[in-house]
Amino acid sequence: MQELLHAPYARVFYQDANGYGAKVLEWPGCYGAGPTAQAAMDDLEQAMVLWVEAERDAGRDIPQPFAVKATGRISLRVAPTVHARFLTSAAAEGISLNRWIEKSASAAIPDQE
């Protein structure tokens, strides 16, 4: 079980009007929720155990993790007005535009480790 829980499954976290949610993309119906990102992650871990047990009890195979190959490179097009706001924000913080986008995007995604 621990091997499955630590495998590189695609865990997605999101915020909605009720708090935070989390799901495993490869496992249909496997999700967690909570008032904080950490609570949603904890709930997802419990849901993963129950999901695997139910699939095994039903005699079904557990899907393999998606093959993700991250290169660290993203090509992104945005409206010129948005680009200008990005540039202004990066300059105000004294960092490069790439670093500012990385920092901003990372802040929007709860830590999954």
Image (cartoon, rainbow, N blue to C red):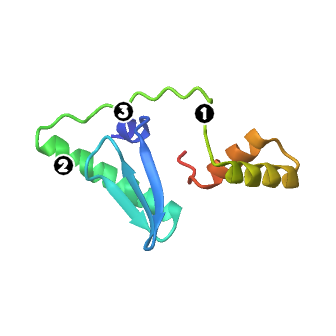
> Which residue is identified by label 1?
74
Q: Secondary structure at mark 1?
A: loop
Q: Is residue 72 left or right of residue 41?
A: right
57, 81: nearer the viewer: 81
Against 104, residue 17 (above or below) is below
Query: Where residue 67 sits: x, y (%)?
Result: 40, 27
Q: Residue lying at the far front in this picture: please name it.
A: 80
User: Which amino acid type is shown beneath numbered disc 3?
Assistant: Pro
Quarter of the image for residue 40 reads: bottom left
5, 25: nearer the viewer: 25
Q: CA distance from mark 1 to mark 3?
A: 22 Å
Q: Residues within 10 Å of mark 3 (few under 14, many from 20)?
A: some
What's the mark number on residue 54?
2
Q: Residue at x 79, y 55 (%)?
A: 89
Quarter of the image for residue 102 reads: top right
Mark found first going from the N terminus, 1 or 2: 2
User: Which amino acid type is shown beneath numbered disc 1?
Assistant: Ile
User: Which amino acid type is shown beneath numbered disc 2?
Assistant: Ala
Mark found first going from the N terminus, 1 or 3: 3
Q: Nearer the viewer, mark 2 or mark 3?
A: 3
> Which residue is identified by label 3?
65
Q: Nearer the viewer, mark 1 or mark 3?
A: 1
Q: Nearer the viewer, mark 1 or mark 2?
A: 1
Q: Secondary structure at mark 3?
A: loop
Query: Where residue 41 sits: x, y (%)?
Result: 46, 56
- The quarter in which the C terminus is drawn is top right
